[in-house]
């Protein structure tokens, strides 16, 4: 999709790259990601530079500038993509964050806290001794466990990545 690279340029079959982008976007969409943001995110991940302008995204994905705008706004809100201004230009470049999955997992803590609060309310409203309350309590216990384990898991990932860096 672009030829910029931190290392050396790599020749690629652009049709195969676009096919991959569409397939990966489909996988993301099948798991709950909005379709157009999934396409834009996959396109950014598939570039060597990890950065594209709105015009480049629109051209590569054959979508409208309005579709790009909405998709990147969504991705910026999720903090999966950042916006940076080209020096001396009025054009923005959109870039996928370094270590994007690690950062996304770190932000899940906030989501888990909210879910736990809602589940606690559900247990109270439904009654801990009712079948529905028991399901809510089991869900709450799972998310509390997950939130407790997530920091150590992410620290191990970060340590492993540090060991693998040249």
Image (cartoon, rainbow, N blue to C red):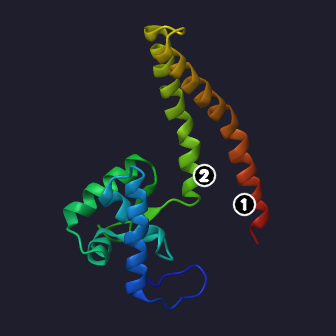
Residue 125 sits in quarter = top left
* Disc marking residue 102: 2
Is 161 left, or right, of 25 in this rendering?
A: right
Q: Locate the C terminus and report the quarter of the image it occupies.
A: bottom right
**Residue sitting nearer the eye, 108 or 23:** 23
- Which residue is pictured at 56% across the width and 54% down the height? 101
Q: Which secondary structure, mark 2?
A: helix
- Which residue is pictured at 60% across the width and 52% down the height? 102
Q: Please say if 42 is above or below 100.
A: below
Mark 1 closeness class: few <14, some 14–19, many ≥20 residues within 10 Å: few
Mark 2 closeness class: few <14, some 14–19, many ≥20 residues within 10 Å: some
N-term mark: 1 or 2: 2
**Residue sitting nearer the eye, 34 or 49:** 34
Is 86 left, or right, of 64 in this rendering?
A: right
Q: Please say if 123 is above or below 140.
A: above
- Which residue is pictured at 49% across the width and 34% down the height? 111
Q: Which residue is mark 1?
A: 161
């Amino acid at each position: 999709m672009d030829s910029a690279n931190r290392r050396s340029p790599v020749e690629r079959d652009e049709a195969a790259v676009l096919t991959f982008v569409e397939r990966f976007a489909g996988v993301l969409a099948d798991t709950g990601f909005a379709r157009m943001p999934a396409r834009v995110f996959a396109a950014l991940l598939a570039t060597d530079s990890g950065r594209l302008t709105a015009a480049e995204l629109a051209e590569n994905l054959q979508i409208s500038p309005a579709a790009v705008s909405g998709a990147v706004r969504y991705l910026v809100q999720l903090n999966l993509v950042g916006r940076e201004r080209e020096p001396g230009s009025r054009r923005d470049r959109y870039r996928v964050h370094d270590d994007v999955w690690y950062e996304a997992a770190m932000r899940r803590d906030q989501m888990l806290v909210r879910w736990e609060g809602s589940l606690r309310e559900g247990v109270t409203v439904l009654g801990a001794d009712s079948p529905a309350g028991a399901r809510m309590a089991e869900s709450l216990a799972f998310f509390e466990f997950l939130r407790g384990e997530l920091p150590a898991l992410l620290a191990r990932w970060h340590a492993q990545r540090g060991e693998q860096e040249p």
